[in-house]
Image (cartoon, rainbow, N blue to C red):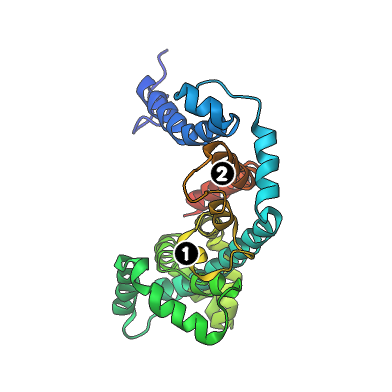
Amino acid sequence: MRKSRSIGGHDRRPGFWVYGVLIAVLVGSFFPIWWSFLIGSQDAAAINKNGMIFVPGGNFFANAATVIDSIPFWNALLNSIIVSSAVALSVVAFSTLAGYAFAKLKFRGREGLLVFVIATMAVPTQLGIVPLFIVMSRLGWTGSLWAVIAPGLVTAFGVFWMTQYLKDALPDELIEAVRMDGASMIRSFWHVGLPAARPAAAMLALFAFIGTWTNFFWPFIVLDPGNPTLPVALQQLQAAYYVDYSLVLSGVVLSIIPLIVLFVFLGKQLVAGIMQGAVKG
């Protein structure tokens, strides 16, 4: 007897073109890392001689050691971990609170305020650099990590992300039931809203961590050369008239390794949390 197909074709396996697109996306995403490793494993003479390089060289560890000795690498690595972790935790905390309020609380001007928050994403970051630097200077924070952490404590994207997720993932009836049992608004958020927001909060934390880790523009302006984050420290590898790309790209690979480790250890948990939230929603 021929098996009947389920409605909507849920039992159909993806076609060849689906796997082809996924493989192309995977190769395109991995290629910049691989190319950085190829250049970082060579020396300057080999790069100038060969031009196009397809085989890794044997100088990566020597170049990496030179990078570590040439810049305040370990101090910059620690600064990047502190700044990225603080910003990620803060963005998740404030964005989840704001998203819960916009999604589930009824107050005057809610829609207009949400539109205003979203509209701030259209303002280029460069327009606020001068007044932001003046504020940090008057606070006495220039040169310190607080000048990098404070402007990123909450983001408009994070508020929008959590608002849209909680609108669909958290039923109003569940909140009303908790409130009828005598729970306060903060308690209902802690016991109902926060558990429902965990999948989206995990992804938001990952986005915020990576965005802060790779941020160069503002830390380059406000931090001292002796107390940089990792991207700013790597900029010190460039000389005035000559750039040794083997050293620069080996430093880039070193800066990417912590992010790869983060994905390796947290990737399955993030995907499992997202799927669990999708099923519950």
Q: Which residue is mark 1?
A: 170
Q: Secondary structure at mark 1?
A: loop
How dense is the environment of label 2, judged by Cα within 10 Å: few (below 14), some, or many (20 and up)?
Answer: many
Q: Position of residue 78 (x, y in %)?
A: 68, 59
Q: Position of residue 142 (x, y in %)?
A: 55, 77
Quadrant of the image occupied by residue 128: bottom left
98 or 197, which lies in front? 98
- Say which residue appears at 48% left-offset and 51% top-offset: 240
Horizontal side of residue 36 vs 254, given as left or right: left
Q: Which residue is mark 2?
A: 252
Q: Position of residue 96 (x, y in %)?
A: 51, 69
The amino acid sitting under disc 1 is: Leu
Tell which residue pokes out farthest to the top in this image. 1
Residue 241 visible in the picture: yes
Identify whether 175 is placed above or below 248. below
Whether residues under marks 2 and 1 lie with C-beta atoms below 8 angstroms apart, the answer is no
